[in-house]
Amino acid sequence: MPFVDVVRSTASNTLVDRSGIESEKKKSCSSFIPKDDSFDYLQRSVFGVLKDPMPMGAVSTLFSSADHSIEKIIPVGGVSFLFMFKSVTDMHSMVNKNLAVVSQFFKSFNPWKDGDTAVNRLCWVLVRGVPPCAWSEAFFRLIMSSIGEMVDWSPQTRNKERLDVAEILILTNESASINKVLSVNFGNFRYEVGIFESHYDPLDWDWSGPNDNLVPTPVADSHTQALSQGLQPSTGGDPSTSSPPTQPHHTPTTPAHHHVDDTYEDPFKLRPLIEKHDPLAPLNLMDPHIINACLTP
């Protein structure tokens, strides 16, 4: 059974299958039909999904040469953004002129259609109970794989300014607030590592490195990677003269108003086990493959 569907009963210390609990809950459904023109802006908007997470400030620089035609860039969630244009004509014109950027940074970039919405989201989580000997990017990436993907970590966490709590930015498909505890074995010791969603705003995430104001340079073969669905490449121009862009250095910062959230409930109610080879087995850091990854800078 999947490890996310298994918890350890605090009373009997036995494994309990929770896979059927959620399915038993009834979900209400309502119908909605817009009756005014308040959604007309979607007809002149492009729904873009990035290949990799990127700060809002960096997304706004991708089409800096087309700022006059883009009315607004709206984060939808995770790696999804809505690019609203002044007109449908401007929308098609801008895309044709920026196919290199589109194909380089976006998984999809097409006129909005019914049903387009984000399937994941960015969020900050606080991680407590990590032993100092495991405090590394490799370890955080490993445990975050149980709920999503690690995107970044705060300078305080990266520089080990405090070892009682780590601040990690993740990309996750979970819509509910994250509140999990993983059982981690290290030699003869067992640690319970808590992962709790923070109130930090993921839109505050930014790069603080030398390339934080990066303006991407189009790649040479952009026309061969042009996206379809009504956005066709123009025939003018010679993209072969363009040079590859410099990739940004991921050096994140957290906003000045950030502080560690000390609201910490104990004892933990749910204790899911992290999946390795055996979905029911706790993570064993003495596994040479794992311990080498965790303890290597």
Image (cartoon, rainbow, N blue to C red):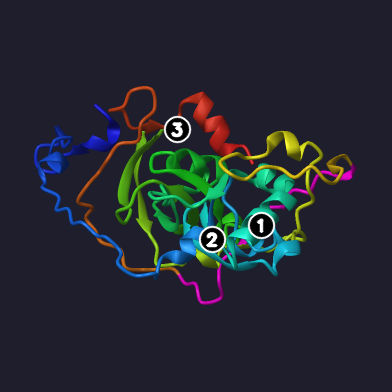
Element assignment for label 2: helix
Q: Quadrant of residue 277?
A: top left
> Is residue 9 in sight in this rendering?
no
Disc number lying in front (3 or 2): 2
Q: Quadrant of the C terminus?
A: top right
Residue range in magenta is 241-259
| Crowding near the residue tagged with mark 2, few <14, some 14–19, many ≥20 C-alpha atoms within 10 Å | some
Disc number lying in front (2 or 1): 2
Element assignment for label 3: loop
Element assignment for label 1: loop
Along the line of sight, the residue nearer the viewer: 58 or 283: 58
Magenta part, dominant SS: loop
Q: Which mark is residue 285?
A: 3
Left or right: 175 in relation to 160: left
On screen, residue 161 above or below 119: below
Instruction: State the residue lying farthest toward the top.
Output: 277
Q: CA distance from mark 2 to mark 1?
A: 35 Å
Residue pictured at 68% horizontal, 63% vertical: 208
Residue type at numbered disc 2: Arg
Residue pictured at 67% horizontal, 39% vertical: 226
Asked whether the residues under the numbered discs 2 and 1 touch, taking CB atoms below 8 Å apart as contact, a structural biologist would say: no
Q: Which mark is residue 251?
A: 1
Mark 2 highlights which residue? Answer: 44
Q: CA distance from mark 1 to mark 3?
A: 27 Å
| Crowding near the residue tagged with mark 1, few <14, some 14–19, many ≥20 C-alpha atoms within 10 Å | some
Q: Position of residue 79 (x, y in %)?
A: 52, 51
Q: Is residue 96 magenta?
A: no
Residue type at numbered disc 3: Leu
Q: Position of residue 68 (x, y in %)?
A: 70, 70
Residue pictured at 31% horizontal, 27% vertical: 279
Dot 3 or dot 2: first in sequence order is 2
Left or right: 23 in relation to 292: left
